[in-house]
Amino acid sequence: MELFKAIKSIYLRYPLGMHVDVQDVLYGLIQPIAPEKILLDATYVPNWKIDLDKEREVVRETKSSEESLAISEKDKKRDEIISSLFQEIRLADKSLIEDRKAAGHRLRLVVDTYKGLQNENMFEETGHVSGLLNDFDKPAAVADLTALGLKPLVEKLRTINGEFIALRESRFKSKASVNLPTGSSLRIKNDNTVNEIFRHIEAAYLSTTSADDRKMISELIDRINQVLSDVNTAYNQSLAQKRVAADKKPKQPKTPKDPKQPKEPKTPEPPKDPKQPEKPGGGSGEQPKKPDEKPKDPKKPGDDGNPDITLPEE
């Protein structure tokens, strides 16, 4: 027989939803045991249950974003149906078939009063969609919608609008719950409670004089440790999978450094004064010498050796 059996401590690192689940499992193991068998006050476990329920409510609150997404999707689908319905009615109003054009014109008088309905906020749009559906339920409108084959589209709008309202009311009800403590504070409180219960169970194992009670407490300790071990393994596997998934993601390219600013060009030095050209004659002021040979006299006519020819006058 073991003189002492220890229970592992529960840690804060688990995500809130996983933490609540672990606490629920532990509560299910401990609650059936008579409090005096494990040295607990009669109110200890019921008070723990109250705090567990509060933590569960906080977890439910974290799902409000999912509800918001569902509401947004319903609103988007509702807008698509309204746009399609209005377009069909306006096209019918331009039809060359007289009966179709007349039905389209009457319905257009109705839908034109709801122009821009898709661009309104969700609250205003919901009220106006309900008004539009009431107008479509009037006998004359029903006959025109049936003639144009648009009654199924109107019923589709009615269904989507009802689903939107139901989702919105569900979210309002969940938000109207009592103000709850933060998830982190409840987590700490419940961890402290369960760890204290563990210490009482360990003490009961040491102090009991009943062999049956010792066997029962020993099995309880084994089951608690098995739960904590399984949860810890599952949590570590989840972390490993997330790390692998993160490693597979392509890394973002590094932001290129800003190019260096070009250096300012140096100011060019002013050009040196050009040398003055030397004067003819070597620059001494003397006139250039005349060539020794005199230029030949220009030839006179007839000096080329050919006799002049004179034509006789008539």
Image: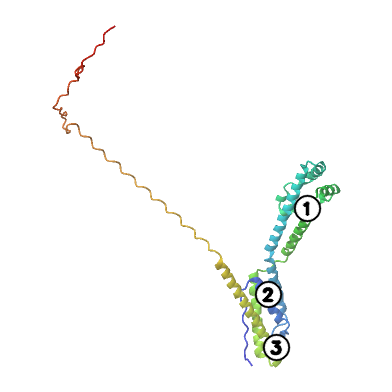
Q: How many labels does the image show?
A: 3
Viewer-nearest residue: 76 or 94: 94
| Residue at image mark 3 | 216
Choose top left, top right, bottom left or bottom right for residue 249: bottom right
Viewer-nearest residue: 272 or 43: 272
| Residue at image mark 2 | 21
What is the crowding at mark 2: few (fewer than 14 residues within 10 Å), some, or many (at least 20)?
Answer: some
**Residue 238 seen anywhere in this rendered image of the structure:** yes
What is the crowding at mark 1: few (fewer than 14 residues within 10 Å), some, or many (at least 20)?
Answer: some
Residue 51, x across and y down, in percent: 69, 74
Residue found farthest to the top? 314
Residue 76, x across and y down, in percent: 70, 55
Viewer-nearest residue: 4 or 38: 4
What is the crowding at mark 3: few (fewer than 14 residues within 10 Å), some, or many (at least 20)?
Answer: some
| Residue at image mark 1 | 153
Q: Which residue type does callout 2 highlight?
A: Asp
Task: Please identify, in this view, whether the residue under mark 2 or under mark 1 is nearer the observer.
Answer: 1
Q: In which quarter of the image is the N terminus?
A: bottom right
Q: Do the residues labelled 2 and 1 touch (CB within 8 Å)?
A: no
Q: Which residue type does callout 1 highlight?
A: Leu
